Amino acid sequence: MKRPYLQLQFLIFVFAFTSILGRLITLPAPLLVLWRTALAALIMVLWLAASKRAPIRMPKSGTLRALGVGVILGLHWITFFGSIQLSNISICLAGMASTSLFTSITEPLFERRRPQRSEILLGLMVIPGLLIIAGASWNHALGLGCALVSAFFASVFPVFNRKFALDGIAPQTLTLYEMIGAAATCLLFATVTGTSAISHLPTASDWLWLIILATICTTWAFSFHIKLLEKFSAFTSNLAMNFEPVYGILLAAAIFQEYKELNPLFYFGAAFIIAANTIHSLINKNTQHPNSAPGELPIG
């Protein structure tokens, strides 16, 4: 496996660990994401000011676009952590694996090209798995539905971020403005839903997990993901992200013993999701995505 794919898999493991932190943090989902993104924005602006490795300012048109992507990102994270709180980590991550299905539609739409039949078929492969999981865990249906909404939002923002990456926008600068947009979205969402930030302040342990979440799993991971999008299409990146449920479910089983809550059919449904990613790897071993970046290697 080439080095970029090893980097992508390590990044996916870090993203999977965010679900563990989401379970450990006691805050409601909108406030959890508000603190996460606000801290990430603060860390990024201080780092940019001190290191001067990337500009703090962006062109006005780029700023507005980045803030808009931040809105999508904020909604994605609210529904992601909301799904964990409504069900559990395993159900949430299984639903998130439908991202490849949504991406097979959203990426061609935004890139103004015809969808690839293989992408749609591979994306559709996750549906039987999701139906089996939903049937086996009907009491977690609301959490699964919330994860599907999160997966839709997750299919959209990498498409826009890849355009930023190919335009040469510094990932750190882009991350700063997207975190600001996400934080503003969460603040508005919390206000509309009546979730008071004053009555739900982080505990001492919450602060520890929030700092880890904001620094490693957000500031670093998100910037690195944008950098990797110079080498991968959004579809390839999102389909590889289907390994996130594997890592997350294993972590949840080891740390929280979630396997005790799951019906055996859950694992049968998860097999469909994993199979889609495996088949995609085999099909694309010697081919390139039609919208791949210059120098992008086929998965192998």
Image (cartoon, grey):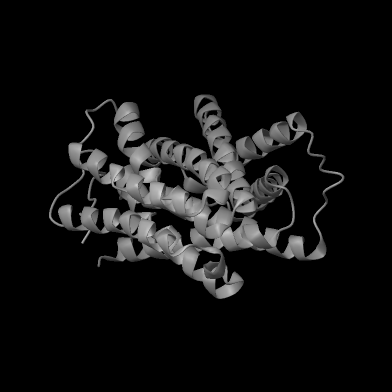
Q: Split into 4 quadrants, where in the image is the N terminus?
A: bottom left
- Residue 205 left/right relative to 288: right
Q: Quick check: can you spot residue 203?
A: yes
Q: Residue at x 63, y 57 (%)?
A: 22
Which of 47/198 is in front?
Answer: 198
Q: Which residue is drawn at 17% across and 47% down?
A: 288
The spot of residue 264 in percent (x, y) is 43, 65
Quarter of the view holding residue 197: top right
Residue 270 sits above or below residue 147 on the image: below
Which of 281/121 is in front?
Answer: 121
The spot of residue 279 in percent (x, y) is 22, 56
For this orientation, the residue located farthest to the bottom is: 254
Q: Which residue is drawn at 45% across and 66% down?
A: 247
- Residue 25 left/right relative to 153: right
The spot of residue 258 in percent (x, y) is 56, 67
Which of 30/263 is in front?
Answer: 263
